[in-house]
Image (tube, rainbow, N blue to C red):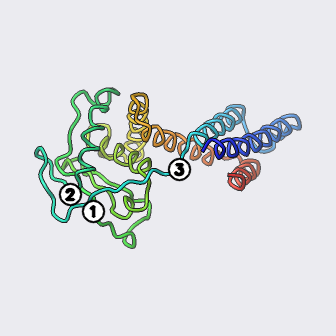
């Protein structure tokens, strides 16, 4: 595992050096002005790339586990569920909502289920969903079957945060999702600091994804397109 990480880190370091060299060359030749890359954008490029490098370094092999899905739902402590594992995970994660100052008195969903989601009827990125008004948390069955625990962790926390309502439910959707994503990272970080290694992996996946989205959202035209393509080719 360490050997694999060292090899990956060397590749990321190499591409980082190439991109920084390109930035220096562009700066020296007035290229930043040519491509409308402002000073703050340049800082953002370096920041996001650094985060992606660190996140990639911390990324580990997917953690597989057998997750139970019951034929008939059961009631556990007034919560309906068809997966004892999922119920126990939500129960374990719930206190961190309070620890991370997201909600003083966290709300435990009254329904926690893994259920079939017809991917043909919607987007493939539907991994889970919450209905805060009904205090319910749902995971897509196909997603649970093909994903590692570190990915599932992030989705559970995200939907659990939605269930807290207030700033994490309703509209406008983009603001709600932004706040929920930030809170999700906070919860995962808290779990990681308290020794949950799978939460640590989930944290770095989420942070790396945020840096990646930030990188791609910048309007850096030819330079950014070239850099991102080169980065993807290497990793």
Do the residues bearing badges 3 and 2 touch, measured as CB atoms within 8 Å?
no
Which label sits on residue 61?
Answer: 3
Q: What residue is at 20 percent from the left and 45 percent from the top?
A: 109
**Residue 23, percent across and down?**
79, 38
Q: Position of residue 65 (x, y in %)?
A: 38, 54
Mark 2 is surrounded, within 10 Å at the Cα level, by few (under 14), some (14 to 19) or many (20 or more) other residues, namely many
Camera-nearest label, 3 or 1: 3
Q: Secondary structure at mark 3?
A: loop
Identity of the residue drawn at 89% across and 38% down:
29
Residue occupied by mark 1: 115
Q: Earlier in the sequence, mark 2 or mark 1?
A: 2
Which picture quadrant has residue 55? top right
| Distance from Cα at disc 3 to Cα at disc 2 | 28 Å
Q: Quadrant of residue 197?
A: top left
Relative depth, front residue between 196 and 171: 196
Q: In the rendered view, does 202 fall on the left or right side of 136?
A: right
Give percent across and percent down for residue 155: 38, 49
In this image, 27 relative to 131: left or right? Answer: right
Look at the numbered disc 1 and give the secondary structure of its residue: strand
Q: Is residue 165 visible?
A: no
The label on residue 82 is 2
């Amino acid at each position: 595992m360490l050997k694999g990480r060292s090899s990956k880190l060397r590749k990321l370091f190499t591409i980082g050096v190439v991109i920084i060299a390109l930035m220096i060359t562009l700066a020296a030749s007035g290229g930043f002005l040519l491509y409308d890359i402002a000073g703050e954008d340049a800082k953002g490029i370096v920041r996001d790339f650094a985060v992606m490098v660190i996140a990639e370094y911390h990324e580990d092999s997917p953690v597989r586990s057998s997750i139970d899905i019951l034929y008939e739902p059961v009631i556990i402590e007034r919560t309906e569920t068809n997966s004892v594992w999922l119920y126990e995970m939500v129960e374990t994660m719930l206190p961190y909502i309070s620890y991370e100052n997201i909600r003083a008195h966290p709300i435990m969903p009254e329904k926690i289920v893994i259920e079939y989601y017809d991917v043909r009827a919607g987007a493939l990125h539907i991994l889970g969903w919450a209905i805060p008004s009904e205090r319910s948390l749902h995971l897509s069955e196909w997603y649970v079957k093909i994903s590692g625990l570190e990915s599932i962790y992030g989705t559970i926390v995200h939907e659990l945060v939605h269930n807290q309502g207030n700033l994490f439910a309703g509209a406008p959707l983009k603001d709600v999702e932004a706040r929920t994503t930030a809170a999700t990272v906070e919860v995962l970080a808290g779990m990681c600091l308290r020794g949950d290694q799978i939460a640590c992996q989930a944290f770095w996946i989420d942070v790396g994804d945020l840096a990646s989205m930030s990188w791609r959202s910048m309007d850096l035209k030819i330079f950014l397109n070239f850099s991102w393509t080169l980065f993807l080719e290497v990793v």
